[in-house]
Amino acid sequence: MENLTDPTILPDLVNKTMPFGRYKDTYYYQLPVSYLEWFARNGFPNGRVGVLLATVYEIKLNGLEYLLKELKKRST
């Protein structure tokens, strides 16, 4: 498992897109909670994709999505 204190995780959530599945090419921070809940129930993928999905899920679960939207505004 990757280091969860990696400083590139938050920027990746707003600048990288889902590489596969129904929401392919959707920014991680824009993925619907229902999709993230499915992964939470069935298991997140291994590697970086799983870390990003689990991180965005926790952020949304705790009502902190506005932080990602602000980060995206500042990164463009």
Image (cartoon, rainbow, N blue to C red):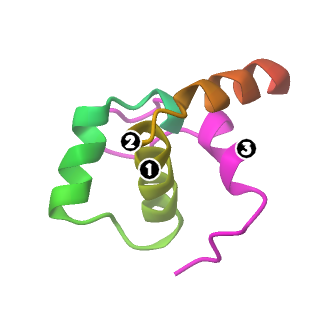
Q: CA distance from mark 2 to mark 3?
A: 19 Å
**Residue 75, position in %: x, y?**
82, 27
Label 1: few (<14), some (14–19) or many (≥20) C-alpha neighbours in 10 Å:
some
Residue 14 is inside the magenta segment:
yes
Instruction: Residue 53: tell me if it is visible.
Output: yes
Q: CA distance from mark 1 to mark 3?
A: 16 Å
Instruction: Residue 27: tell me if it is visible.
Output: no
The residue where tag 3 is placed is: 11
Q: Residue at x 76, y 18 (%)?
A: 73
Q: CA distance from mark 1 to mark 2?
A: 5 Å
Tell whether 63 sits left or right of 4: left
**Residue 6, position in %: x, y?**
73, 67
Mark 3 element type: helix
Can you say whether 23 is above or below 52 in the image? above
Foreground mark, 2 or 3, reads 2
Q: Between 39 and 57, which is closer to the camera in this rendering?
A: 57
Could you say which disc has been placed on residue 58 in the image? 1
The disc labelled 2 sits on which kind of residue? Leu
Could you say which disc has been placed on residue 61 in the image? 2
